Image (cartoon, rainbow, N blue to C red):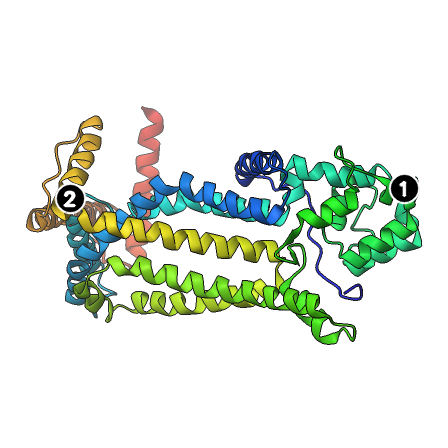
Amino acid sequence: MDGLVVGAVVLTKTGGILGPIADILGWIMDLLFRFTSSFGIENVGLCIILFTLVTKVLMIPLTIKQQKSSKLMSVMQPELTAIQKKYKGREGDQKAAMMMNAEMKAVYEKYGTSMTGGCLPLLIQLPIIFALYRVIYNIPAYVQSIRGYYEAVISKLPSGYETSEAFTALAQAHNMAGDKFDLTNVNTVIDLLYKLTGQQWDSLVAAFSAVGDAVTDTGIRVVDAIENMQTFFGLNISYTPWQVISNFFFNKEATGTTLIMAVSALCIPLFAGLSQWYSTKLMMANQSKQTQQAQDDNPAASMMKSMNVTMPLMSVFFCFTFASGIGLYWVAQSVFTIIQQVGINSYLNKVDIDDLVQKNVEKANKKRAKKGLPPAKVGNVDEMLKKMEEKEAKEETARMAKIARTKAQVEESNKYYNDNAKPGSLAAKANMVAKYNEKHEKGNKK
């Protein structure tokens, strides 16, 4: 496996809005690692699973809110589809588009929700999900307890280690050599060490014997402790499944151990795809048959159905090239989602849709009251269209009045300058100049 080349990911923490979120999630994972360590279990794979469970539990309120919006949307969908069919073929008609939006808005108000109501929980979850990936991908950057092991190794490296032949070879094996990578930077070195294979650790210890002498507080060699905590069911989670599988097939000295590792590596992408597909299927179970029939004619809905199949397949593909820790997270995420979705589906099946609508309407009217607006008259499409037509009529009247005033001003100006001369004639132009000068002189006298 030493000859394999993998892409480098710099360990530098992410910035922007994801930075603080990732720091909080890293702190949670650090607590979990300390918790399992108190029982003598120091394993990153186990922490990833527990970490996934905790984050799923924390996001349950948002998930339930989103699922309620989805259930409400499934009830509304036939009405919305009927409105879209009503105006089909009139996409270029601005008035028809406004009327269609008014009718759709009335449907949303009738159910006490808005066109963006179902998107808000998802928008809140997205930064959390992206931050989760950053933490899982760069665990030592965010989990201080794990980072400490790598810092212990770095402290044993001699001065000038970055230019040594052994260290340079390790950096080149992971595409981390060259001017872009500062191998004197602690973060960069930790990122490199996090990706080392067992044989590469042996090479590092052979080149720098002091690294092999570094021990933990419990007397265990730091190198052994790092390898043990990164191994989950015989698989090092810093390796990609493709690395492990290709090593089994191209290694002439393959053993039963490497076979078990290859099977474990193969299971991660397959389980990730299957579990994601099944969790999506459970989410779609809330939709009624009537809604599903209404969506059959909707191109966007058909595209979503295709995505529900293609996305799990893409997960399988990406899992082969990502570190196994990411694949393990995806599997744990989907498994916990399945368990969670079974509970949510059971809960939502007991929810009375009329009560849900009533509560939504009450919330919407409270917000309107705070803004000084009257309660929404839900479902009154005709009244909304009438107001829109009245507004359009007023705007059209104002526009025509403006055109009439402009026309009158032009006619008055022509009459003043042309006198009795034929419009456009040389005499008319001469009169225009004379009248202008006369008017200008009178103005100066005043």
Residue type at mark 2 is Val
Q: Residue at x 9, y 41 (%)?
A: 377
Pick the residue in front: 90 or 369.
369
The C terminus - image quarter: top left
Q: Nearer the viewer, mark 2 or mark 1?
A: 1
- Could you tell me if residue 433 is visible in this image? no
Q: Residue at x 54, y 35 (%)?
A: 28
**Residue linked to disc 2:** 357
Q: Position of residue 373 (x, y in %)?
A: 16, 31
First in residue order: circle 2 vs circle 1: 1
Q: Secondary structure at mark 1?
A: helix
The answer to which image quadrant residue 321 occupies is bottom right
Residue type at mark 1 is Ala
Q: Position of residue 97 (x, y in %)?
A: 21, 58
Q: Position of residue 193 (x, y in %)?
A: 76, 49
Q: Is residue 120 left or right of residue 396?
A: right
- Mark 2–mark 1 Cα distance, whole angstroms, equals 69 Å
Q: Residue at x 78, y 54 (%)?
A: 176
Q: Is residue 208 above or below residue 86?
A: above
- Disc marking residue 210: 1
